[in-house]
Amino acid sequence: MKEDLAANRRAGVIQALVAGLVGGLSFHFWRVEVAYVAFGFCGLFLVAGLFSPGGLYPAIRRVFDGFGRVVGKVLTWLLLIPTYWLFFTPFHLLFRSGGRDAMARKLDKDASSYWIERSGEVPDPDSYERQFR
């Protein structure tokens, strides 16, 4: 249990430092309102991490973890679906209009077999070990 408390204290202090850095940079370069919000999170993380590493800090962490999962799912749907439709669909239509079949999926009804003969020698069994050095 002591490792959890020490790890929570350390994580709270690190998150407070990062939030303080973001607040300082925001205060200096961008908007003061954003800096105040970042400084608020800095104080929250610091107080929770130092004074309540077993109670308040894990609760705050669960809230932020849940928020991160929701944001991740939303961004996945918002970014990957348009990327798929804007990238893969045009190339599929382009290849199909040109008659290209990169996976050789066309069936030949007159073929007796679809076996592809290997050219060259049979590889040495040692060549199969540690292929990606």
Image: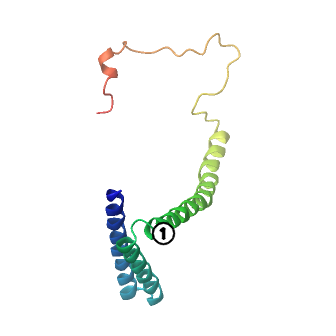
Q: Residue furthest front?
A: 1
SS type, badge 1: helix
Residue annotated with mark 1: 60
Residue 69 as seen in the image, left or right of residue 128: right
Looking at the rendering, which quadrant does residue 28 occupy?
Answer: bottom left
Percent from the top left, x then y, of residue 108?
67, 19
Looking at the rendering, which quadrant does residue 105 occupy?
Answer: top right
Question: Which residue appears at 53% of the width and 66% of the height?
Answer: 63
Vertical arrangement, residue 109 with respect to residue 76, above or below: above
Percent from the top left, x then y, of residue 59?
49, 66
Q: Residue furthest right?
A: 109
Percent from the top left, x then y, of residue 130?
30, 27
Is 17 or 86 nearer to us in this picture?
Answer: 17
Question: Which residue appears at 39% of the width and 67% of the height?
Answer: 53
Percent from the top left, x then y, of residue 75?
57, 61
Label 1 CA crowd tier, 10 Å (few <14, some 14–19, many 20+): some
Vertical arrangement, residue 70 with respect to residue 116, above or below: below
Vertical arrangement, residue 89 with respect to residue 75, above or below: above
Type of amino acid under label 1: Ile
Is 81 or 22 nearer to us in this picture?
Answer: 22
